[in-house]
Image (cartoon, helix red, strand yellow):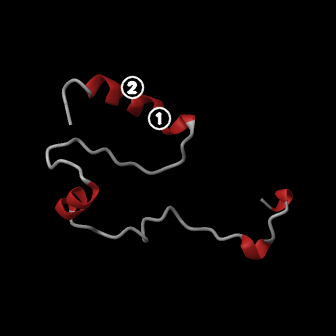
Amino acid sequence: MLSKGVTPENIVVISHGQFLVQKHDKTKLRKKMGIDKEALVLGTHGFASEYEGFDKVIDAITKLQNEFKN
């Protein structure tokens, strides 16, 4: 980042964020976001890079679409 011209005072390192995650009521979140209580919900975090395996997740979702209509 420094080599791209970002000054040190503008750089902040946040360790994975696991300490920043808050617990929420899943039922309330589904209602707020308009997600059916029976719908399959997939959540993940990480870098959207090849080694994280997002391509495998997308393939799996495609295969599961017929099984989970919502």
Q: Which residue is the site of mark 2?
A: 59
Q: Earlier in the sequence, mark 2 or mark 1?
A: 1
Residue furthest toward the bottom? 9
Q: Do labels 2 and 1 touch, CB within 8 Å?
A: no
Residue 53: mark: 1
Residue 2: x, y in percent? 82, 62
Residue 37: mark: none
At label 2, the amino acid type is Asp
Residue 7: x, y in percent? 81, 70
Eyeballing the image, is 55 above or below 7? Answer: above
SS category of the residue bearing label 1? loop
Q: Residue at x 21, y 66 (%)?
A: 25
Eyeballing the image, is 4 above or below 67? Answer: below
In which quarter of the view is residue 14 placed? bottom right
Q: Residue at x 28, y 56 (%)?
A: 33
Residue placed most toward the observer, 63 or 18: 63
Residue furthest toward the left? 38
Residue 37: x, y in percent? 15, 49
Q: Is residue 48 left or right of residue 20?
A: right
Q: Residue at x 18, y 47 (%)?
A: 36
At label 1, the amino acid type is Gly
Q: Is residue 1 left or right of residue 26?
A: right
SS category of the residue bearing label 2? helix
In which quarter of the view is residue 51 placed? top right
Q: CA distance from mark 2 to mark 1?
A: 10 Å
In the picture, the quarter occupied by the N terminus is bottom right
Indicate which label's residue lies in the foreground, 2 or 1: 2
In the picture, the quarter occupied by the C terminus is top left
Residue placed most toward the observer, 20 or 26: 26
Q: Residue at x 75, y 76 (%)?
A: 9
